[in-house]
Amino acid sequence: MPDAMPLRSLDRHPDLVRAATYAREIPAPIAAVWENVHDWEHLPWLHDQAFTKIALREAGAWGWHADVGFPGEAEADVELVIDHEAACYVARTRTDGMVRGETWTRLTRLADDRTGVEVEFLLPAMPAAARAQAGAAMVALYTGLWDQDAEMIRVREASDPARRAGPADRAPVALGAWSQVRASLPRVVEFGGARFVLALRGDRPVVFAAECPHWRGPLEACAIEDDGSVVCPWHGYRFDVETGRSRDGRGLRLRPAPRIELDEAADTIRLVASGNPEQV
Ligand code: FES
Ligand SMILES: [Fe+2]
């Protein structure tokens, strides 16, 4: 079994051997892909098929080091160490202080909005057939992980505030007949140049930001929980849909939502700017 090795080493462990390689393109700028590499927090949320929990030990420009849980109650400590000059990084897994594997990834800028990803999986020496099988499993796993990352990056880039055009128009928005709107909920509505989720909470409509204030995760697909909160699918941050306040002490707040004007007798519903200066 490969021996211990100093933390943050940018050397390949001498006892590991290559089990497989994997290459693909991500249709996003390289800076967005590096942002994703630093983002340790999404592992058990976006990739919940592969990771069950993560507890950070430390992080910095050099990368991060965390205790990670895997399906089946396995645990390991994982460090991700970046070689900035070589534009590559290693994810190194240890249990009981011993290195169990390294995944080396190189990022290449192919164009302004295209990034090349080349991955090499290093595992302990084992018979050739077992190595081929383990390598194929790693390629299958990483194909799924990068698919999920690519989609998260795509959504984040598309929602970048800098790309949004035009000043906010805060005119009231008539949504139509309440009886028909009600049957279509939940749905996304626009107000003041931003996207909001209009959903039912019990019998009552509520409206809240469709974009997570952490890293712009999509809240439109989130079910409202019994306590009135939504949990972002990217990093698990929790928000109160009525007030927009954080429900997990993280100090972030949803973008202020407009006010709902519902007239059941007239069968109308519309969104209007809130009178509260803190709100839209
Ligand atoms: S984007 Fe990170 S928790 Fe929502
Ligand atoms: Fe990821």
Image (tube, rainbow, N blue to C red):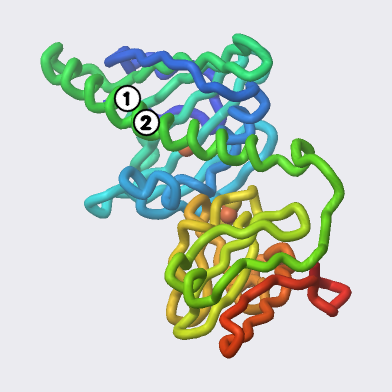
Label 2, label 1: how far apart the Cα atoms are: 6 Å
Q: Which residue is mark 1?
A: 2
Residue 99's disc is 2
Vertical arrangement, residue 88 with respect to residue 149, above or below:
above
In the image, what residue occupies the spot 43% across and 37% down? 148
Say whether disc 2 or disc 1 marks the residue closer to the N-terminus.
Answer: 1
How dense is the environment of label 1, judged by Cα within 10 Å: few (below 14), some, or many (20 and up)? some
- Horizontal and vertical percent position of residue 29: 64, 23
Mark 2: amino acid:
Val
In the image, what residue occupies the spot 63% across and 49% down? 216
In the image, what residue occupies the spot 53% across and 14% down? 116
Mark 1: amino acid:
Pro
- Horizontal and vertical percent position of residue 133: 16, 21
Q: Secondary structure at mark 1?
A: loop
Q: Could you tell whether 22 is left or right of 268 in the image?
A: left
Q: Is residue 262 visible?
A: yes
Vertical arrangement, residue 251 with respect to residue 169, above or below:
below
